[in-house]
Amino acid sequence: MNIVLLGAPGAGKGTQAQFLTDHYHLKLVGTGDMFRKAVTDKTELGAKAHVYMQAGKLVPDELVFGIIQDNLTHGDWEKGLLFDGFPRTVLQAQELDRIVGTKGAKIDKVIFMSVPREMLIQRLTNRRTCHSCRRIFGSDAREIKDCPVCGGSLFQRGDDTAVTVSKRLKEYECKTQPVLDHYGSKVVHIDGSLTIDEVTKKLISSIE
Ligand code: AMP
């Protein structure tokens, strides 16, 4: 089963993707994390991507295709894939259809998590990530310094500042929202403003 999670930055895709990949034993394909790793590893691709990420812009499609190809060529497809943060443009969606087609597969589910703009801004500017276990903590995480799960230190992503968040949301509206039309009636809509557990339940019932 191959699933695409769509939604604006801050819709909760990353949090739910962690849960869904464990639950259904899927391989997670998260382009945001791939680019952040490339930045940390100081690769040439990472250096190029970093410029766009810090500016709140989408990384150009050709760089995205490079990182996706690397990942899917060497990856394990057996149980299926879960895409978080990809595709983000119509061209990327077309490329994804082509790549899965070459394996004789298709995208089985496209789930769109909708969240009001004000809530997205609030979530993004407050959220923190754990350096050690990479878990993401929402709304009231501003007040916590250490990860409540593993004790690792929490940090704020460089692109979660108010100015960059508003640029990311503009990019999303211009370039990623049209991806919904690409998938048309295949898209299942879920209210992403509910609690994490409620959203998880809705995702599971839309998948099963
Ligand atoms: P995310 O963690 O998914 O919010 O991604 C963080 C940043 O990485 C985005 O704001 C983009 O700059 C870049 N990025 C991640 N995935 C993509 C993609 N599929 N297309 C273009 N840029 C991406």
Image (cartoon, grey):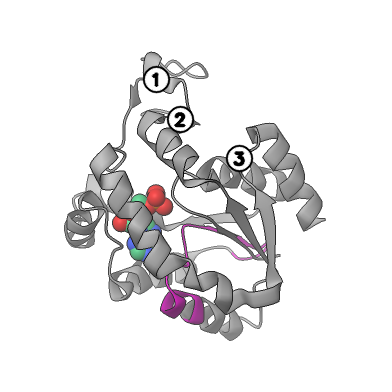
**Callout 1: CB less than 8 Å from ligand 1:** no
Decide: is 176 above or below 199: below
Q: Give the range drawn in magenta.
A: 77-94
Q: Are marks 1 and 2 in contact (CB under 8 Å)?
A: yes
Q: Is residue 18 left or right of residue 146?
A: right
Residue at figure coordinates x 22%, y 58% from the top left: 52
**Within 10 angstroms of label 1, few (less than 14), some, or many (20 or more) residues?**
some
Q: Which circle, 2 or 3, is nearer the viewer?
A: 3
Per the image, label 2 sits on a secondary structure element best described as loop
Give the amino acid at mark 3. Answer: Ser
Q: How many marks?
A: 3
Q: Give ligand 1's quarter of the image.
A: bottom left
Place residue 1 in its image quadrant. bottom right
User: Which residue is tagged 1?
Assistant: 152
Q: Is residue 199 left or right of residue 35?
A: right
User: Which residue is tagged 2?
Assistant: 133
